[in-house]
Amino acid sequence: MDRLTATRVFVEVVERGSQTAAAEALEMSRAMVSRYLGELETWVGARLLHRSTRKLSLTDTGEQLLPQCRQMLAVAETMQGISPSGDSAPRGNLRIACSQSLAQAWLVHALNEFLALYPQVGIDLLISSEAVNLVEARVDLALRITNQLAPNVIARQLGVCRSAVCATPAYLKRHGTPQRPEDLAQHNCLNYAYFGRNTWKFKRDGEPFAVAVNGNLSANESMVLLEATLAHAGISQQPLYSVSALLRSGVLVQLLPEYQSQALGIHALYGSRRQMPPALRALLDFLLERLTEKPDWDC
């Protein structure tokens, strides 16, 4: 637990009168505020606040601890930025959650560059296709590809993920090549479970529309569907970061190129904007810079 941050959260909750107000002031999620309060109470070994639906009030222990917490924060502000060696480089461990496809195709390479720049930082990657709870999984940063973020999350869009509908030449030789999105109904379409299982979304001339598709295989990880596509099992929608090289080499063929598959935002989710470790701030800026540059998968 970051005890200094937990202390700041405790003081902010007391001064503002509620966890919700403290979360807004600290630019932190309500769940993260609750987590810090709970862990601070565990560390102290006593409850610090009486919680009710109407108001918060200090316990006897909270009354005794509050002045000391304020003093601790004052000392921390005085010390902030002071380093005897003059070394202000980011350091510490970060836990990052990401899907397998993005991690394998791009993130791990970007992290290798970042770790070479900041050798005092360590990174633990949590690979999962599901949206993890940052508090419960103790994740510092989650990368999610979606257009539907929950309204209460703290997020920063880093880039855009574009996709391509593709198949192997062997599959197309046996089953024919769809000329219109509606033709996909006659094909075995391999579906990503979190991406609209029976509906694929497109745009043409700026106008959005959707087509119904069916197939005999779905999965919650696009890399699995990519392997099935390469095995000539059917047609799939794949992120360009996974298939751009395969499309350029001719191993896969992009279908319906005049129709744009729905683009999704690549978002970074984290617990707080203000209470952010220097290593995390440096990583966010680094990833944003990498994705702002035209990605080599944007073919």
Image (cartoon, rainbow, N blue to C red):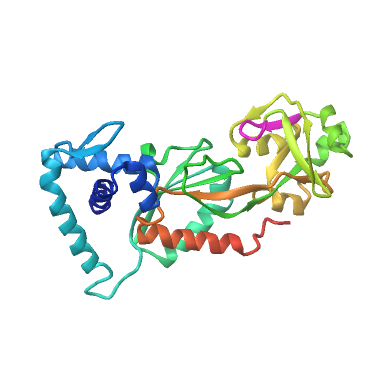
- Choose top left, top right, bottom left or bottom right for residue 60: top left
Q: Residue at x 38, y 41 (%)?
A: 30
Seen from the viewer's position, the closer of residues 73 and 212 is 73
Q: Position of residue 133 (x, y in %)?
A: 43, 37
Magenta highlight range: 189-196
Q: Residue at x 62, y 38 (%)?
A: 222
Q: Residue at x 41, y 55 (%)?
A: 273
Seen from the viewer's position, the closer of residues 280 and 77 is 77
Residue 87 falls left or right of residue 144: left
Q: Position of residue 139 (x, y in %)?
A: 39, 44
> Considering only vertical position in the picture, is 201 above or below 93?
above
Q: Position of residue 46 (x, y in %)?
A: 14, 36
Residue 217 falls left or right of residue 145: right
Q: For residue 94, say whether it is visible.
A: no
Quarter of the figure that contains the C terminus: bottom right
- Asked if the magenta segment contains residue 228, the reply would be no
Q: For residue 261, say whether it is visible.
A: yes
Q: Residue at x 57, y 53 (%)?
A: 106
- Choose top left, top right, bottom left or bottom right for residue 282: bottom left
